[in-house]
Image: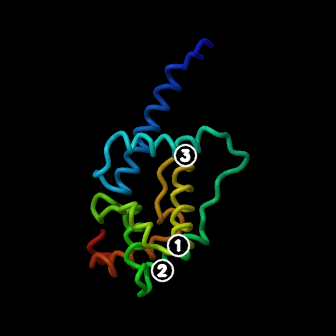
Amino acid sequence: MPTPIPIDPAERAERAEAEDAARELLRDLIGADYSDTTLRVCADHLLSFRRHPKTQAEQPPTAALDRLFAIAKSDTGQSARVANFLLAWWNGADLGHFPIADLFGLDRAIADDITAAVRFLGRHPGAVYADSLGYRGDVMDLLARWRGITVEDAA
């Protein structure tokens, strides 16, 4: 049996901090209804993307996000689900979480766009929100449309 490679204590602490942050991101996104085991498995999957070195910085999926915001602002049967995803990303604790099972009711192209957004968030080295990608006005529009919150209320 091979001898395990010792892990530097600083690296171990950094890894534990990243795992906690990933679990917290997942808890904010999909809600606290999932067990710690489920969140740990999902967090480990997200963190596996970080363990592989990147040759260039990950670019945000702007085309996918543009489509998602357009759908969330429209009046289709899938608008509410897409809006729930985007608002959960913005502030799931206060605005509601995105049930993963809602992906089952979305067209494949829309689910692919949500997956692209989650993949980007999982691969990004820190927290990133829609406003830092230029979508603050779009989020404010969704807050007004789907939650009845105006810019004055959000401030």
Instruction: Name the residue rendered at 61%, 72% in the picture.
Output: 63
Task: Identify the mark nearer the N-term, 1 or 3.
Answer: 1
For mark 3, what is the residue? 125
In the picture, measured across the screen, residue 66 lies left or right of residue 104, that is: right
How far apart in space, not on screen, are marks 3 and 2 (Cα)?
Answer: 28 Å
Q: Secondary structure at mark 3?
A: loop
Q: For the residue carrying disc 1, how many other residues have a C-alpha within 10 Å: few (<14), some (14-19), or many (20+)?
A: some
Q: Badges 1 and 2: C-beta atoms under 8 Å apart?
A: yes
Instruction: Name the residue rendered at 47%, 38% in the picture.
Output: 18
Instruction: Specify the amino acid type for callout 3.
Output: Pro
For mark 1, what is the residue? 110
In the picture, measured across the screen, residue 39 lies left or right of residue 61, that is: left
Q: Nearer the viewer, residue 152 or 124?
A: 124
x, y percentage for residue 94? 27, 62
Instruction: Name the residue rendered at 30%, 65% in the picture.
Output: 95
| Image quadrant assignment for residue 7 | top right
How far apart in space, not on screen, are marks 1 and 3 (Cα)?
Answer: 25 Å
Q: Disc 1 vs disc 3: which is toward the camera? A: 1
x, y percentage for residue 6? 56, 16
Q: Secondary structure at mark 2?
A: helix
x, y percentage for residue 76? 43, 85
Q: Residue furthest right?
A: 55
Rendered position, 61 above or below 75: above
Q: For the residue carrying disc 2, how many other residues have a C-alpha within 10 Å: few (<14), some (14-19), or many (20+)?
A: some
Q: Nearer the viewer, residue 107 or 4?
A: 107
For mark 2, what is the residue? 71
